Amino acid sequence: MAYTPAALKAELNERGWRLTPQREIILETFQNLAKGEHLSAEDLRDVLKDEGEQVSLSTIYRNLKLMARMGILRELELAEGQKRYEINQPSPHHHHHLICVRCSKTIEFKNDSVLKAGARTAKKSGYHLLDCQLTIHAVCPTCQRSLLPV
Amino acid sequence: MAYTPAALKAELNERGWRLTPQREIILETFQNLAKGEHLSAEDLRDVLKDEGEQVSLSTIYRNLKLMARMGILRELELAEGQKRYEINQPSPHHHHHLICVRCSKTIEFKNDSVLKAGARTAKKSGYHLLDCQLTIHAVCPTCQRSLLPV
DNA sequence: AATAAGTTGAGAGCTATTCTCAATAAGGAA
DNA sequence: TTCCTTATTGAGAATAGCTCTCAACTTATT
Ligand SMILES: [Zn+2]
Ligand SMILES: [Zn+2]
Ligand SMILES: [Zn+2]
Ligand SMILES: [Zn+2]
């Protein structure tokens, strides 16, 4: 509810870049995503196709990376295999991830003090913060019981 | 200084796996690594070759993954391109990473309260903790000054 | 409307990582 | 120790996520 197409355009133009229909629709898609959903490049392509919007994979890859580097999206390494993305939201909605390394089941959790600690660390070194993510790798209760090694 | 070959063997055998010279030497290499060093699979292959130890890339990839899933190594996504690994150490040596998304310059920092918060979160959900890593994506002072967009 | 420069789409290209499988070696049992 | 079972290794092929290339097109600006 925060980031309008106009704001995106302003931020792009400021750097000599342009607002395209593809970029606008990608932002909109992530903003409308259900809580807890994380899309890979191909996922996004499929979601867009379902909505009748055709955007090429090249363009999707390019813009996921671009928007992550602008701090608009977060780039996550949840399961093995491919990167996943979600919208990068400030404090009340900001969250972290607890991941089972065996089945990839992922739990989101909030912790504002961790977020604050991250922001403080970045500032102290003069870094401009884009994203702060606590990632916990663990084995979920189900996989602990399964006895299958690794 | 903590993890002996015997301890590695015990933990492997417990799961029906075996201690091989390759596994022993990989563990030893990571234990002797300088603070702040993070090796990719190919890096490790080269380091081993320099020490006169020939281990195939297949074996290296397999065992990096295995040892990460055992909680012995940490699998990190520092720069783009490939995964990097380091030994997973407990509290006094445990640390997190602040990464410039443009030049990949990485700073390690410690924060025990973040580590504790992660451990608490895993426990609360019944997960068995393997690794807890706070990753901060940001733009370093040098890259902020460079004016080159993204 | 004209211009300059950024962006897109299609497909080729790249490369980190995984897979396959025959040969080998570790661990447990006798 | 010796034997047996099964995990592991190494070499190379295969996979796949992602990037690159470039002509056609679109955006922002004047
Ligand atoms: Zn999330
Ligand atoms: Zn699980
Ligand atoms: Zn480190
Ligand atoms: Zn930098």
Image (cartoon, coloured by chain):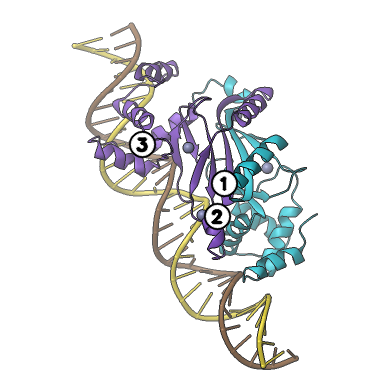
Chain colours: A purple, B cyan, C yellow, D brown
Q: Within 10 angstroms of label 3, few (less than 14), some, or many (20 or more) residues?
A: some
Q: Is residue B78 above or below residue B44?
A: above
Q: Amino acid at mark 3?
A: Ile
Q: Are marks 2 and 1 in contact (CB under 8 Å)?
A: yes
Q: Residue B125 has which mark?
A: 1
Left/right placement of residue A117 relative to residue B51 reads left
Question: Which quadrant of the rendered structure holds the N terminus of chain B?
Answer: bottom right
At 25% from the left and 34% from the top, the residue drawn is A53
SS at mark 3? helix
Q: Is residue D15 above or below residue B34?
A: below
The mark that comes first in sequence, 2 or 3, is 3
| Distance between mark 2 and mark 3 Cα atoms | 36 Å
The percent position of residue A50, horizontal first and vertical second, equals: 25, 40
- Under 8 Å from ligand 1: the CB of mark 3? no
Pick whichever, A108 or B93, lies toward us.
Answer: A108
| Distance between mark 1 and mark 3 Cα atoms | 35 Å
Left/right placement of residue A134 relative to residue A4 reads right
The percent position of residue B85, horizontal first and vertical second, equals: 63, 50
Q: Amino acid at mark 1?
A: Ser
Residue on which the image places disc 3: A60
Which mark lies nearer to you, 2 or 3? 2
Left/right placement of residue C6 relative to residue A126 reads left
Left/right placement of residue A83 relative to residue D24 reads right
Give the chain of mark 2. Answer: A
